[in-house]
Image: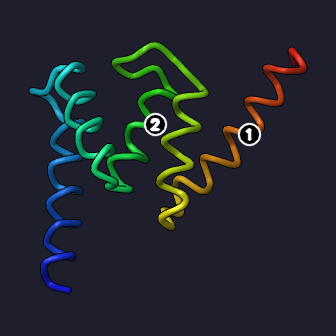
Amino acid sequence: MKKILLIVFLLISVGNLAFSEGWTDEERIKWFHEQAEQGHAIAQFNLGVMYDKGEGVEKDYDEAFKWYRKAAEQGDADAQYNLGSDQGKRVKLILHL
């Protein structure tokens, strides 16, 4: 249990550093992709945010949806919320609202 808590703490800490000054967009994307591919929900959520907002990458709602869904399936409440919001964006795009 302590090991899991330490890993979560480290992911949050490094994730916060990745959004602070000093990391290039390319470094942030690479780091989050590596962590997200390993199944870390926090990294999956952050990657979803980056694609959703176009931070360091071209806006891609499908890619954002993919990463939000992966994080949400692991119980990430923020990802679940954004997943619902993302669904609204997708409907607006389809209906051209």
Q: Measured from the top left, where is residue 48 in percent x and y?
A: 46, 37
Mark seen at residue 87: 1
Quadrant of the image occupied by residue 8: bottom left
Q: Measured from the top left, where is residue 16 in percent x and y?
A: 22, 46
Secondary structure under tag 1 reads helix
The colour scheme used here is: rainbow
Q: Measured from the top left, where is residue 32 in percent x and y?
A: 27, 38
Q: Measured from the top left, where is residue 42 in percent x and y?
A: 35, 54
Secondary structure under tag 2 reads helix
Residue beneath the point at 53% across and 63% down = 77
Q: Around disc 1, counting alpha carbons within 10 Å, would you say few (fewer than 14), some (14 to 19), or many (20 or more)?
A: few
Q: Is residue 41 left or right of residue 87?
A: left
| 36 shown above or below 54 | below
Looking at marks 1 and 2 on the same chain, the residue that comes earlier in the sequence is marked by 2
Mark seen at residue 48: none
Mark seen at residue 49: 2
Residue beneath the point at 63% across and 47% down = 83
Give the residue type at disc 1: Gln
